[in-house]
Image (cartoon, coloured by chain):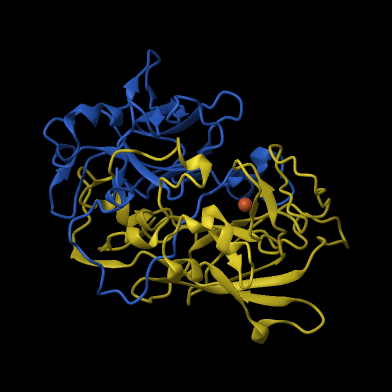
Chain colours: A yellow, B blue
Amino acid sequence: MSSSIKGVSPRQYDAQPAMDYPDYRSTILRHPKHKLVAVPQTLSDVTGPAFGDMALGQYDSDLIVNYAEAGQSAIGERIVVHGQVLDEAARPVPHALIEVWQANAGGRYRHKNDSYLAPLDPNFGGCGRCVTDAEGRYQFRTIKPGPYPWPNGGNDWRPAHIHFSIFGSGFAQRLITQMYFEGDPHIAICPIVQSINDARAVDQLTARLDMSKSIPMDLRAYRFDLVLRGPSSTLFENKLEGN
Amino acid sequence: MDPLEIRRTRPAETNTQNPLRETASQTAGPYVHIGCLPNSVGIDKIYDNDLTHYGAINHKDPITIRGQVFDGDAQICRDVMLEFWQPENEGTWRRTGTDFETGFYEIKTSKPVSMRDENGNEVAPFITVWVTARGINIGLVTRIYFSQVDGDAQLELVDESRRHTLIAKPLDEAGVYQFNIHLQGDQETVFFDI
Ligand SMILES: [Fe+2]
């Protein structure tokens, strides 16, 4: 178990998506209508599972080959996605488990509920994971996912994106989000993105082409940094009863 | 209701001492299993096993919790991912999806113990639950309480008429509890701003 003696700073909801955003149709019946109830934090919020030492497979962070037949690789634009996980106090978050998933280069997910016309790529599974190093840095290799249409009542297409799941050291830092690609014109017209009413927060979800980490004749790099909730000024003692 | 009212759940407390802002959440979408439970959707060549457990699997005080998740039309949600966390001992974490056909989830864990909050007050035992799915833009936090909740300082903050949504219901089978989650509607579950 990872543990911190500090509390987690209050979540800043003005930089978060609206829970009720009718342009993203699925939120209509899936958002709570009551206000969230603010309660003092407990040990359960400032601790969380520690996956920093978990045994990862050799190719867990290489989506180009982790589902491919020997000697083959996924079809698509070869990229490496890298960045740093920080907290709001700008401190690196080491040993954080990051899980990613995405559509293939044609915009098709390997999932029984996805019936989009674009074909599956027999060499692409669509998931990967890694753990941040001592400086909070991570990277994985993949192919650039394709945009895809989705049922939302109209002619809706998602920008190309990679889904991210991140564990901080406290469960209150738990985050699932999506990474977009610099220059994608779908970002501005996607209701899922636009449920965030804050241009700076959307910009923070947009990965930048990073030629400094690109490998000639091999792949291009995109940089995507993540920020988890930071420390609050409230110190408290972590004590369990009967333990 | 003004949507901003939903967001501003905390009083004037600010976060200005920190230079960066938390990355915005986005929905886990309908295909969250690919990333978090890939073996459960047939992607079985990448990880040996899905990551569903952290901490003890054998428990002194074992319990089973099962239930379903409902939307505002009382329809069963079959694409939900749930995580459960309790910090006692080395901590116990569980992850599961609701069944694609029945919508049921089920976890085995141990009965939680009480702990103190940041003000030093003892709080009733609970399990923290994190709910994500298509249509949920930011993961929802709720808690499973059992009994001994009378006079709990944290539950006092919850409308009395809604507290029952947080209490697991014992089923006939010993050690088995039902905990349904209503994202919206008459029975809307209490969700917390932690
Ligand atoms: Fe997606």
In the rendered view, does B23 fall on the left or right side of A3? Answer: right
Where residue B59 appears, as percent x and y from the top left, is 40, 35
Q: Residue furthest right?
A: A71
In the rendered view, does A31 fall on the left or right side of A217? Answer: left
Q: Residue at x 52, y 69 (%)?
A: A132
In the image, residue A125 sits, relative to residue A95, either above or below, namely: above
Where residue B164 appears, as percent x and y from the top left, is 25, 26
Q: Residue at x 31, y 63 (%)?
A: A4
Q: Residue furthest bottom?
A: A212
The answer to whether residue A194 is visible is yes
Q: Quadrant of the N terminus of chain A?
A: bottom left
Q: Residue furthest front?
A: A154
Q: Quadrant of residue B112?
A: top left
The answer to whether residue A165 is visible is no
In the image, residue B134 sits, relative to residue A92, either above or below, namely: above
Q: Nearer the viewer, residue A221 or A51?
A: A221
Q: Nearer the viewer, residue A200 or A8?
A: A200
Q: Residue at x 39, y 66 (%)?
A: B22
In the rendered view, does A115 fall on the left or right side of B61? Answer: right
Where residue A185 appears, as percent x and y from the top left, is 63, 66
